[in-house]
Image (spheres, rainbow, N blue to C red):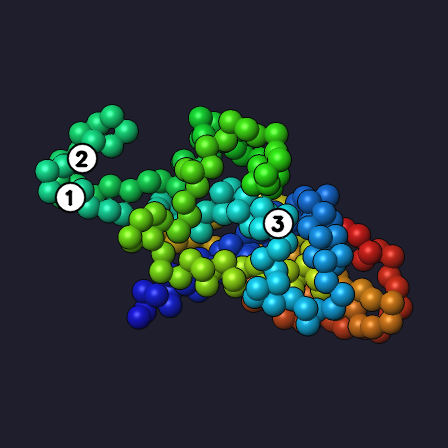
Amino acid sequence: MALIIIAGSETNATLLVSIASILAEHPEIQQKVAEEVRSTFTNEDELTASSVNKLTYLRACINEAMRLFPPAAIGGPRVVSKGGATIAGHFVPENTIVAVAQWAAYHSAERFAKPHEYRPERWLKEHPFEGDNLEVFQPFGFGNRDCIARNLAHVESRLVLAKIIWNFNIRVYARHEKWREEQKSYVLWDKKDFFCNTGACSVEGQVFYLEAWGGRWSESLMCRSKTLAEYSTI
């Protein structure tokens, strides 16, 4: 039970914090996904676990974030079955522990064009990366032993991100522009705190300035305002 709780909560926390940092660094992509979310729905109540599945660009952004910064960078270990197996042209004896290093696979130029760039369009039906081997992308594992909660993880990440995008624009503090490069991974990521500003605006409503500490959001200042042009875009 402890393993399920840790694996389920920590990996999604890593995904949401990493995609927040990525979108803050790429305001043009953040603007595009915001336009998709805010033009598809008329109010926040319409954002549900099922309705957000039609947000194809948001889903592409999540997939690309998991490729660029996989929540489990080393992949799940497996034991070679009796008699051994041939893997990538090499014979591996039985009882050998093997794993696919997700970080290495997802950053390989042999598998992905421009592997170190955040390019959500590679996950759309029409994209400029025809040579990409998308089957390599298996963040939840593969086969009978894949992640038991993969569907739940999809629901949580899409719904939470859609609600964040619906309400807020994300801007990163200058000193955290290289946040992902400073992290260390063992089995899961030993994440340092990530600080960002989020601004929400409406014609007549409340404007929130928020900060995030490793994915834990708290309100630091609130004020009344009419339209604030500085928060209409990133």
Residue type beneath disc 3: Thr
Residue type beneath disc 1: Ser
Q: Residue placed at 68% from the left, 72% from the top?
A: 45
Q: How many marks?
A: 3
Q: Secondary structure at mark 2?
A: strand
- Can residue 76 be seen by looking at this rendering? no
Residue 112: x and y in percent read 49, 31
- Foreground pick, 113 / 52: 52
- Which residue is identified by label 2? 85
Q: Residue placed at 58% from the left, 51% from the top?
A: 59
Relative side of 192 to 205, left or right: left
- Foreground pick, 152 / 177: 152
Q: Residue placed at 28% from the left, 29% from the top?
A: 88
The residue sitting at the right extreme is 226
User: How far is mark 1 from mark 3, CA to CA?
Assistant: 39 Å
Q: Secondary structure at mark 1?
A: loop
- Which residue is identified by label 1? 81
The 10 Å Cα crowd at callout 1, few under 14, some 14 to 19, many 20 or more, is few
**Is the residue 71 above or below the residue 109 in the image?**
below
User: How far is mark 1 from mark 2, CA to CA?
Assistant: 7 Å
| Mark 1 or 3, nearer chain start | 3
Quadrant in which the N terminus is drawn: bottom left
| Mark 2 or 3, nearer chain start | 3
The 10 Å Cα crowd at callout 2, few under 14, some 14 to 19, many 20 or more, is some
Q: Residue placed at 27% from the left, 47% from the top?
A: 77
Q: Secondary structure at mark 3?
A: helix
Kindly indicate whether the residue at mark 2 contacts the one at mark 1 (C-beta within 8 angstroms): yes
- Which residue is identified by label 3? 56
The 10 Å Cα crowd at callout 3, few under 14, some 14 to 19, many 20 or more, is some
Residue 203: x and y in percent read 87, 67
Quadrant housing residue 205: bottom right
